[in-house]
Image: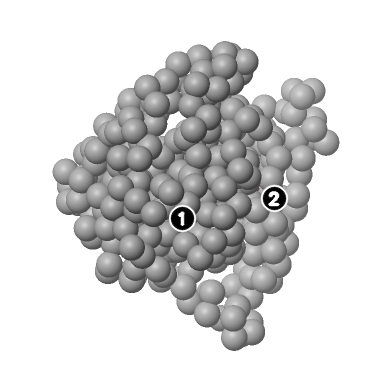
Amino acid sequence: MQTDLRGRDMITTQEWTRAEIDTVMEVAHDLKRKRALGEPHAYLRDKSLAMLFFFTSTRTRGSFEAGMAQLGGHGAFIDHTTTQISHGDTAKEIGEIFGRYFDGIAIRQCDWKVGNQYIRDVAEASRVPVLNMQCDVYHPFQILADLMTIQERFGREGLRGKTINVSWAYASSYQKPISVPQSLILLMTRFGMNVRLTHPPEYKLMPDIVEQAKENTRRHGGSFEMLDDFDTGCRGADVVYAKSWGALMTTEDNEESARIGKQYTNWITDEQRMAMAAENAVYMHCLPADRNIEVTDGVLDGPQSIVYDEAENRLHVQKAVMALTMR
Ligand code: CP
C-alpha cells in the first residue's frame, strides 16, 4: 500500500503507478464496506473541494458532492457560466486563487483540444491537488470505477486473461467525447486483460494513446487487438463495454460526424450480441446511454448489466482518491 499520495493530481491513471492504483482500489473497497455498515469515515473534516464544471453531469457531480460530505467536508458546485472565466479569469488565476480557498480543485472541461490543457494549466498554478472529472482525452475516475466493478465481478487477481471488448456503438443524441474508451484501453492493459478495441474506421482514437496501450500490454502481459467488426469484438468477451463516441479524429464538424455515424446504426448492443459473448459475460456502460439506439432496454436492464454497480463505484473510488490526496 502506498502512503505518500498527499498532494498528488489525478489527471490520467497513466501518471499513477500500478502500486498506487492498487492502493486506490484497496481504499475504495474499504470505504464501500464502511458506507454499507454505516461506519463514519470523516477523513476530510473541514476540507473543501471546488467542483468546476464546463459541461453537464449527473453521476460525476452527484458522486463528488456526496463523497465530500461523507468524508466530512464540502464540495462546492461551480458552473463556469456563473464565474468570471468568460470575462478573463485565466486557468492560472483559477489554479492560484482556488488553490488558496480550497483543498482540492476538480474540473470537467471536455472541449476538444482544450480540456486537458486547461486542467494541466490549472494544476501548474495550484498548490492543492487537481482532479480531472473528465476532459477531452481522459476520464480517469470513470475508469477507476470500471476497474473496481470488474474486480468485484471477476476477483481482484482474476482479470489476467479476461477479455474486454471496448467497442464503439451508435448514438444519435450527441457526439460523445473519446475520453472513456481512451482511458479504458490505457488502464485495462495494465491489469493483464486481453483488450479489444472495436470501431468503424472513422472512429479511431488518438494514435499516441493507442501506442501507450500497446506498450502497457508489452509490459504487463495480456493482449491488445484492434477490430472493425462489432460481432467479432463481442464473440467470447467477458466484458462487453460498448458505447458511442464522436468521429473526432476524422472530423471536428459535429454535423459531419453525425452523418458518418448514420452508416452504422446497426452497431447496437442487443441480446443477440450479448449471446455471442462468454457465458458469464457482463455488460458495462458509463452512462448516459441512448436507450434502444446504443443499447437495448433488454440488455441495459437485463441480468448481465452491471451499469448501476459501475455508477455507484464512482462514489467509492473518488472518495478514495480524495482521502489519499487531500488529507
Ligand atoms: N459517466 C459520467 O461521467 O456521467 P456524467 O456525465 O453524468 O457525470
Mark 2 Cβ and ligand 1 under 8 Å apart: yes
Looking at the image, the residue that sits furthest to the front is 272
Q: Is residue 118 visible?
A: no
Q: Position of residue 111 (x, y in %)?
A: 60, 27
Task: Kindly identify the residue that appears in the image at 59 percent across and 28 percent down.
Answer: 175
**Residue situated in front as seen by the camera: 145 or 95:** 145
Tell me the residue at 57%/48% (across/down): 296
How much space separates mark 1 and mark 2, taking CA atoms?
A: 20 Å
Secondary structure beneath dot 1 equals strand
Residue named by callout 2: 58
Q: Quadrant of the N terminus?
A: bottom left
Residue 113 vs 58, above or below: the answer is above
Residue 85, how many percent across, how many down? 74, 29
Q: Secondary structure at mark 2?
A: loop
Q: Quadrant of residue 39?
A: bottom right
In this view, the mark in front (1 or 2): 1
Q: Is residue 24 left or right of residue 123?
A: left
Classify residue 313 as left or right of residue 193. right
Q: Is residue 295 above or below residue 246?
A: below
Residue corresponding to mark 1 = 283
Residue drawn at 47 percent across, 52 percent down: 271
**Most foreground residue, 107 or 274:** 274
- Kindly tell me whether residue 281 is visible in this rendering: yes
Amino acid on which disc 1 is placed: Tyr
